Image (cartoon, rainbow, N blue to C red):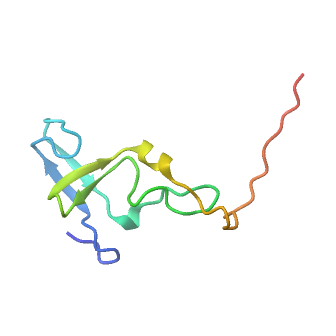
Amino acid sequence: MRCAACGWFAGDILAVAGEGNGDMTPRVIRIRCKCENWNRCARCGGPLADGRLSAYEYDVALGKVLYRAAYSGLGHQYDHGAAPSRVVQPRVRALP
């Protein structure tokens, strides 16, 4: 079913032919929509990727379930001109 807010497919599917990560064990996997992407950059507050990290999504063009690995968010580059979403003070501990 499509998400009413973003239009991406979302919901649970029965994966029996290795959908997502190639695992042939029958299992239920949750397909995440764009609205469920809560992975944000600590500096700019922007999303780290188009979809949620470490989650399954349905690619309409390919007609397949894909897995978005967590490391795919490492390519995020924040806008250097944007103000930080919050100011975080580093925690400093005195050495003995």
Q: Nearer the viewer, residue 11 or 51?
A: 51
Estimate the x, y position of residue 17 in percent, counting from the top left: 9, 42
Q: Residue at x 37, y 44 (%)?
A: 69
Q: Residue at x 17, y 46 (%)?
A: 19
Q: Quadrant of the N terminus?
A: bottom left
Q: Quadrant of the C terminus?
A: top right
Q: Is residue 6 above or below residue 30?
A: below
Estimate the x, y position of residue 15 in percent, counting from the top left: 14, 47
Judged left or right of residue 80, residue 8 is left
Q: Residue at x 53, y 58 (%)?
A: 40
Q: Residue at x 57, y 56 (%)?
A: 41
Q: Quadrant of residue 3?
A: bottom left
Estimate the x, y position of residue 52 in percent, counting from the top left: 39, 56
Q: Is residue 4 above or below residue 82?
A: below
Estimate the x, y position of residue 37 in percent, counting from the top left: 42, 60
Judged left or right of residue 53, residue 28 is left
Q: Nearer the viewer, residue 56 or 78?
A: 78
Judged left or right of residue 9, residue 77 is right
